[in-house]
Every structure is written in C-alpha cells, then in structure tokens.
Amino acid sequence: MRWPHGATWWCGHLAIADSGNNRIMVWDGFPDRAGAPCDAVLGQANMTRCDHNMSSYYPSAQAVNMPYALAAAGERLIVADTANSRLLGWSNGATASDARWLSCQPDFASKGDNRWGRRARQRVLALWPIDAGQSGRNRGQWEQPRTVVGVGAVIGERLIVRGQVQGVGFRPTVWRLANELGLTGDVRNTSEGVEIRVWGAGSDGFEKALRAALPALARIDAVERRPIVAAPPSDFSIAASAGEGMHGAVTPDAAICADCHEEIRDPFARRYRYPFANCTNCGPRFSIIESGPYDRARTTMRGFAICGECGAEYADPADRRFHAQPIACHACGPRAWIEHLGGGTVQHEAFSMLDDVDAAGGMLKNGHIVAIKGLGGFHLACDATRADVVETLRARKARRGKAFALMARDIEVIRKYAQVSDEEAALLASPEAPIVLLRASGEALPDAVAPGLDRIGFMLPYTPPPPRSAPHGAPGGDDLGQPLGPSAMHG
Ligand SMILES: [Zn+2]
Ligand SMILES: [Zn+2]
C-alpha cells in the first residue's frame, strides 16, 4: 500500500483508496488479521500493477490516476479519481471491472480540468445518489445501471452451508429454488459443505426458502452468509466441485424411497426389478464414497459408465435423479447374480422364471441359507417361518441364544407377527431403516428366532426388494423371511 487516502465500508466490503498505487483495494468483509491480502483491486488489471491510468496517458473505465477519496452510496462505490479530474462510480467489486458511472468528464477517456463549468448538463451530480427512477433524463454522462433491479443487482451473497448437504440432492434443490425465485449465481460442493452464490431481488428470502424446501435426507447445521460484489452470471448453474477432501459429515446410506420402490414394481418402468435403483432421495452414500467432495468420480460407481437414458435423467433438473451420483439401471449399473458357496453358477431357472434375485427368494423358500451381499456387508438370510432352517443357521453361526433380526417386505407383513404402533411404523419406514424391537403377537414364529424373548427385532429392506411375481412354495412364505446375521443385531 502506498499513500492510502481514503477508506469506506461498501456493502460488506472494505475499500481503501491506495492512491500511490493508482488503485482501490477491496476486501470481502473486514480483514481478519494483519497483512491479509485484499480480494480484488479496481483501477488495475491485477494485483501486481500500479501504473497510473494503466500505463496510458488517457484514462478509461477501468483505470484511475491517484484516487484520493472514497464513499459508498447504496450499491455504488464513488471514487474521486483526483488526477483525472473526475468522479467514478463502481457497482462491481471484481478486479479490473469497469466503472459504470462517470461525472465531470464527457467520457471515460477524457481527463481535462474544469469540465464541470463548461458542461451544465453534468450538474446531475446533485441528483446522484440513487433516484434512478426520475433522474434518467438529467443524468448526463451517468450511465444507467444495466439491470432494472437496481440496488442489490450486483450485490450478491455467498452462503457456506454445513451439515448433511452432499449427496442428498441439495444442489439440485438449490438450483430449482434459485430458478423459481429468479436468482442467478451458482452452487458447488466444497470440502466444507456447499457454497452458494446468489444475486437478485429475491435473495433475501433465499435461505428461508431453502430451509423450507430441504430434500428428505438433507440437514443444515450452520449457514454462514457474506455479501459479495461481483458481476452476476446470467443464469444459475451447478458448478464443478471445489477443493479436496471431505471435512463435513458423510451422508449415511438411505433406504429406498417410495418413488424408487414404486418404480421397481412397475413392469413398464425402465428399472423394473432393478436391485440397485436409487435417486437423490435414497440409496447408497457412505458405503460408496472413497473421498470428497461427493461426486460420482470419487465413489465406487466411477467404474460404471452412465448410459444415455440415465445421463438424460442426471442432467434433467425436473428429474428426481438430477445429479444423483449413484444413478444406475439395468443397462449401465451393477448387476446381481447368485453363486454357490463353493463357486459356480446357480441355474436360476430351478427357482425362478425371472432372474437371479428372484431365484434367491426361491432358494430361501426352499430352505436354503443365502448370503446376500448388500451395502456395507453380507446378510445371512433364511426363511424365518421354518424352525429347522433357523436352527441350521444357528448351528452354522455357532450362535446359541442371541436373537436374530427379521426382515419383512412391508409393515403389513410385520403386523402379522408383532404389534406396531404409529411411532414404531414411522421408525421402521425412516431412511435409516433401523431394526425396531416389537412386541410379538399374532402368528407365532419358531422359538429359535428369538429364544425366550417376547420381543422380536424387525426391519424393512433398505435396498430395493424386487417383487415376486410367481408364487413359490408355501403360501405366505413369500413375504417373510430372512433372519439376519449377527452383525445386524447390534441395534
Ligand atoms: Zn429413490
Ligand atoms: Zn443407465
């Protein structure tokens, strides 16, 4: 800094007239420590230049010559550009941006003295502060603001949002909301959370609207807001992730949502019976993330190239899979198959006319024990209505008395075997899909499931459970099954 002559507070920014260096230094907010470098400069092309009028004899809309004073008026930063005998007005604090307003000279390239006296129409200086509505015809050289929004048009806001905000459809929600509110700007994942920049008349209510429109799995812990002065972009976009690493909370996996559930049961849907269906409201997160910020390229899904149809959904803001990182389908995503423990394929036709997933259901019903590789580990499953099979599983696990957890297709099935209160039903259906301890009632299950206990632990499937379409085995055997391995019993 050289001969600083003026300082002012401009829409959340500190601006200092660094006269001897022919520039205005601008800090985003008040510098938080001695020696903090400024964030932008006006009057020079970059931080390292200091020549008057940017090395030219004549000035321009970007250049200054010994600016001695500053004042802020609404969105405008007024600069006394002393050696050019003129006043300039900026509404954009980005480095090297153009001044928009000019007084005391006929144009931005002039620098003659005493223009004021000779050009009466420039006396609009008296009208200067704001009053954009009426003073247009008197404005002389004062350039009109480029947008009708006026004050606030170029004062944007930066929001740093922390919490469970990555991998939960947060950016698409922000995108939709910003478009609804007519805001421009961008949103990106960062190593801290999500950074949003917004400009526009409705930006004041943006945070409130965002909190009201949070997607199902999102949770906001903290929002830090700061004004920014920069040229607003022409639209609102989802920008590339910034930074490395993930310091915020990693979003846990979430149980399949109602929409995806419906989809895999619809024979006319693209994902009919697809066991890895997911969307921004459900599906894997924690189990597939390798590093942050959360993007497909940093998950185990990066090995699966997205097909054209999934790509179209991923890119469509109106689709619930807009920017769903684990998006997948039969054509492009992971597959499920069934194998013998000793290796070798199982002929699924022996158990099902459909596919390997259905065949696994058929095997359960025929008294087999099936290890199901799911998110984050294996579940050992068998038909819980068959005492002999449950005993076999106990013997193989060398697990004497500890209860097995049960998984059922839906709450109606659970109600056949246990009392389910409204709270318990809500808990069962929550995205965490926990094991819920319920009071046994109704149809009795073999004592081997939970020896000596009057409570049984039930959960609902948290990954897509494709429907059975062909009846198999004993009636009713279709909808209950699967005591889970000991690892699932810690709940
Ligand atoms: Zn879903
Ligand atoms: Zn696909």
Image: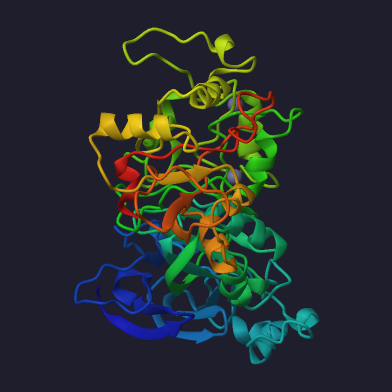
Observer-nearest residue: 33 or 394?
A: 394
Task: Work out which quarter of the rendered image holds the N terminus and state it.
Answer: bottom left
- Is 108 in front, or is 390? 390
Residue nearest the observer in this picture, 307 or 56: 307
Q: In which quarter of the image is ligand 2?
A: top right
Residue 201 place in picture, x, y as percent: 67, 73
- Count of all numbered marks drawn on residues in the image: 0
Quadrant of the rendered structure where residue 437 is? Answer: bottom left
Residue at (49, 43) in percent of width and height: 407
Please say whether residue 97 is visible from this viewpoint.
Answer: no
Q: Quadrant of the C terminus?
A: bottom left
* Rendered position, 8 above or below 377: below
Residue 162 is situated, as x and y percent measured from the top left of the image, at 40, 65
Q: In screen coordinates, is 482 left or right of 142?
A: left
Establish if 467 lies above or below 438.
Answer: above
Colour scheme of the picture: rainbow
196 shown above or below 239 = below
Residue 16 quadrant: bottom left
Q: Is residue 437 left or right of residue 393?
A: right
Farthest residue, direction bottom: 126
Is any part of residue 8 visible from this angle? yes
Please report the residue visible at 31 percent of the width from the left and 68 percent of the height from the top.
Answer: 38
Instruction: Tell me residue 255's x, y (percent).
Output: 51, 47
| In-front residue for pair 444/357 | 444
Residue at 66% x, 27% y is 309
Q: Position of residue 202 (x, y in %)?
A: 66, 73
